[in-house]
Amino acid sequence: MANSSSSSSGGIGFVGLLAIVFIVLKLTGAIAWPWVWVLAPIWISFALGLLALAAVVLVAWKRP
């Protein structure tokens, strides 16, 4: 019988953890930042992902 093991890495990443920390700090009044900056880790990572996707599509489109 073969010994097989598998593991999956899941959970919250650095960006998610940072967003949660900022949200908790905002809700407790520890920081007085606008919500746009509190949620910045989420929208900045989303924007970078869209930028990377656009670059891949552009390179694939330019190839003959």
Image (cartoon, grey):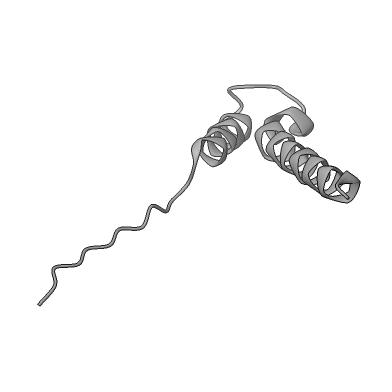
- The image shows residue 11, relative to residue 40, as above or below, that is below
Residue at image location 71% in from the left, 32% down from the top: 40
- The image shows residue 21, relative to residue 13, as above or below, that is above
Horizontal and vertical percent position of residue 52: 75, 40
Farthest residue, direction bottom: 1
Residue in the foreground of this view, choosing between 57 and 11: 57
Residue in the foreground of this view, choosing between 48 and 52: 52
Residue in the foreground of this view, choosing between 54 and 61: 61
Horizontal and vertical percent position of residue 41: 66, 33
In the picture, the quarter occupied by the N terminus is bottom left
Farthest residue, direction front: 64
Horizontal and vertical percent position of residue 62: 90, 45
Q: In which quarter of the view is residue 22 placed? A: top right
Q: In which quarter of the view is residue 2 placed? A: bottom left
In the figure, is residue 60 to the left or right of 33? right
Horizontal and vertical percent position of residue 64: 88, 50
